[in-house]
Amino acid sequence: MTEQIIEKIEKIEKKHHKKETIRSSVVLKVYRANRLAGEPGRYERIEVPVQRWTTVLDALLHAKAYKDPSIAIRYSCRMASCGSCGMEINGIPRLACYTKVSELEGSTITVEPLANFPHMRDLVTDFSQFFDHHRDMQPYVQNEHADIKDREKLSEFMQSPEDLDRFLQFSYCIKCGLCYSACPTVATDTKFPGPQALSQAYRYFIDNRDAAGKERMNIVDERHGIWRCHFAGSCSSVCPKGVDPALGIQLLRGHLLGFSKNEKKIADLQERLKRD
Amino acid sequence: MTMLRESQIMKIHYITGIAALLVVAVHIMMRLIMPYSMSLGYENVIANYHNIPYVVLLESILVLIAIHGFNGLRIILLELRQSKAWEDGVTILTIAAMMGVIAYGTRTIIVANGLGFE
């Protein structure tokens, strides 16, 4: 049985195997503009040396360090955890720190700021609207029975692995904004919360520690809410963390349409003092 | 301007879409039981309008497609611009247009049926 599974995985891996191209240098075609100063956009070509493990972020930082220090980039962890370095690489929204130069085709790599976000400077965009949509979904567990203020009474929820599985993948979201950038609805409708916020609404809706499911449903059940998703699925295909926001949106729609049960058994609380 | 929640509107949208598919299929099948040119002959058309079950079918096609189509148009227009005035305007206009089309179509059915004129 295990051998069969391994064989299957190997077959899938072979099918999706990306050919790595080893080069000694690449040309970065970097979008440059300072919107705040009213500068028009232009592309700057910068040649940088690369190695097999060089990521696009490494290449950009090399260009910034040795060729042009004025390139504006937002980055932090360099390991696909913080979600800061999202940009369009060869036209696709990706994390620069998670994209190796060797996995891209051609010797020229075009790097542009994320689409659907207000542009600030070079590769930096404004995330305020994106975070506002996220905040609108009340992305936190709401349960009046859980005392979070009194440390003595600090309580914990009893949650089974099955309960956890229902929302686990959605909690891997790092708020990098790639799905928001890839969403065709967000491109025309700025009031649309976007795949990230909607999948987070589902993540808390389905979490059995949370008791504010109805309120959250009312938030997304608006003219510019969940129903404006066209199910293009591009959000799920660009997510660097394997989250499937399109699935979350469709599952939440199922609850709104009444195909899925809206009532959930709220997880039992166990007071820490009692347990001890 | 929120008489119905968006989920209720979308439920109506999906139900009318599926129902319209069924009634249009019946309508097309009924057109195909005789040669197409004959089916559009004056006497045949008038005879159809005098056949009450068929009239009910035509009216339901009219209502279902008008609701589904104009709501679809409302959705497309809502995504074009984001302002309360635009959204309310689009909603009112599409509902008015939908009611106008249903009223005009129903009038055609009533006139062709001869109801109220005999």
Image (cartoon, coloured by chain):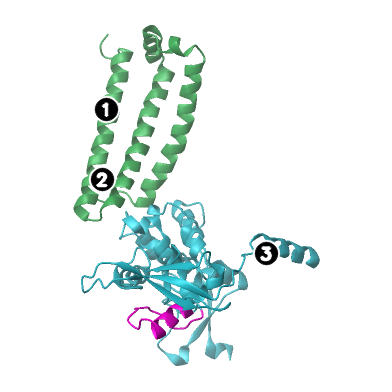
| Residue wearing tag 1 | B103
First in sequence, mark 1 or 2: give its number: 2
Q: CA distance from mark 2 to mark 3?
A: 50 Å
The residue carrying pointer 2 sits among few (fewer than 14), some (14 to 19) or many (20 or more) residues within 10 Å by Cα, namely many
Which label sits in the foreground, 1 or 2? 2
Q: CA distance from mark 3 to mark 1?
A: 60 Å
Kindly indicate whether the residues beneath marks 2 and 3 are on one polypeptide chain: no
Which label sits in the foreground, 2 or 3? 3
Chain B color in figure: green
The residue carrying pointer 1 sits among few (fewer than 14), some (14 to 19) or many (20 or more) residues within 10 Å by Cα, namely some
Residue A151: in magenta span? no
Residue positioned most to the top: B43
| Residue B78 spot, x, y in % from top left | 29, 50
Helix, strand or loop at mark 3: helix
User: Which stretch appears magenta?
Assistant: A57-79
The numbered mark at residue B91 is 2
Mark 1–mark 2 contact, CB under 8 Å? no
| Residue wearing tag 3 | A13
Helix, strand or loop at mark 2: helix
| Residue A193 spot, x, y in % from top left | 36, 62
Q: Quadrant of residue B96?
A: top left
The residue carrying pointer 3 sits among few (fewer than 14), some (14 to 19) or many (20 or more) residues within 10 Å by Cα, namely few
Q: CA distance from mark 1 to mark 2?
A: 18 Å
In the image, taking residue A105 as reference, residue A13 lies left or right, namely right
Q: Chain of mark 1?
A: B
Residue A61: in magenta span? yes
| Chain displayed in cyan | A
